[in-house]
Amino acid sequence: MTRAADFRRYREDPDAYATEVVRMHLWSKQRELARAVLDHERVAVKAANAVGKSTAAAFAIHHHLAGGPGSVVVSTSSTDAQLRRVLWRELRSQLKRTGDFFAGATLTETEVFIEPGWYATGFSTDTPEAMQGVHADRVLVVVDEASGVDEGIFDAIEGVLAGGDARLLLIGNPLRTSGTFFDAFNSRRDEFHTITISAHDTPAFTGEKAPRELTRRLVSRRWVERLEKRDPGGNTYLVKVAGEFPSRADDAVVARADLEAAQAQDLEPGLPIVIGV
């Protein structure tokens, strides 16, 4: 099989690429994420703590590059430390397991360069100008910990998505009840394919078969049970265990859940309208 044939095959089969080339196991939600990036132009993933979201985001970058020449990835995160020490550290680890699949590639702390027009790069959120001039046959933009990324970055991203086969992956803990990441699951949900990864979706709770090496890195039943006792139904539980946005912002007067419940009510004709201020 020629390298071109490899690229064509693995471009459409992320699970085979993970198993045969990277020699890593994707659990079901990670496979769902990888498939979604292929099938949808814009994907938003909100996730609980320790469910392998950065591993999945790194694999999305890695797999996009496996599509062959003309594949470009631009990535960023909420902080430079998150970008370098988490997302790109995981990406470098995965790339080193591929042997000579990317023969001749140059790998640095935040860049893998294979040839002109075939590379992945990471940039900090204080340099949005790094987005300018990014054009290729196939472009993927990955925003890790998207809830904490400045809105100005998303304006720059729109320029990258303007032409060709361009895709966007937003992923992170659902920390803030405002901004582009929040809107992707609410007012702009018609633009995004959305995925939620709860701690209860992981193999420790579902019984899904997975290698011990993987399950050791994922959230444990003991930690979830402790948090459920400490903060049942509270914002900490919602964000860290359920993978849901908090029911209210820290500086909000009215909980978002209460507001949505009020909006969903049917008013009976003839009854007076009562407003509390």
Image (cartoon, grey):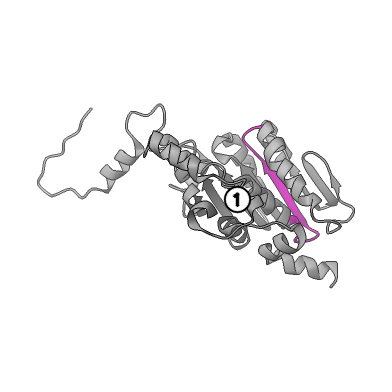
Residue placed farthest to the left in the image?
A: 270
Q: Is residue 67 magenta?
A: yes
Q: Nearer the viewer, residue 5 or 219?
A: 219
- In the picture, the quarter occupied by the N terminus is bottom right
Name the residue type under label 1. Thr
Q: Which residues are magenta?
A: 65-79
Would residue 98 be seen by someone viewing this image from the given angle?
A: yes
Which residue is nearer to you in this view: 125 or 157?
Answer: 125
Disc 1 target residue: 215
Q: Is residue 190 magenta?
A: no
167 to the left or right of 66: left
Q: Position of residue 100 (x, y in %)?
A: 86, 57
Q: Residue furthest right?
A: 104
The spot of residue 136 in percent (x, y) is 75, 54
Tell me which residue sits at (34%, 35%) in the image. Answer: 255
Instruction: Locate the C terminus and report the quarter of the image it occupies.
Output: top left
Is 236 in front, or is 163?
Answer: 236
| Number of marks present in the image shown | 1
Residue in the image at 58% along x and 60% along y:
209
**Residue 34 drawn at (x, y percent):** 62, 58
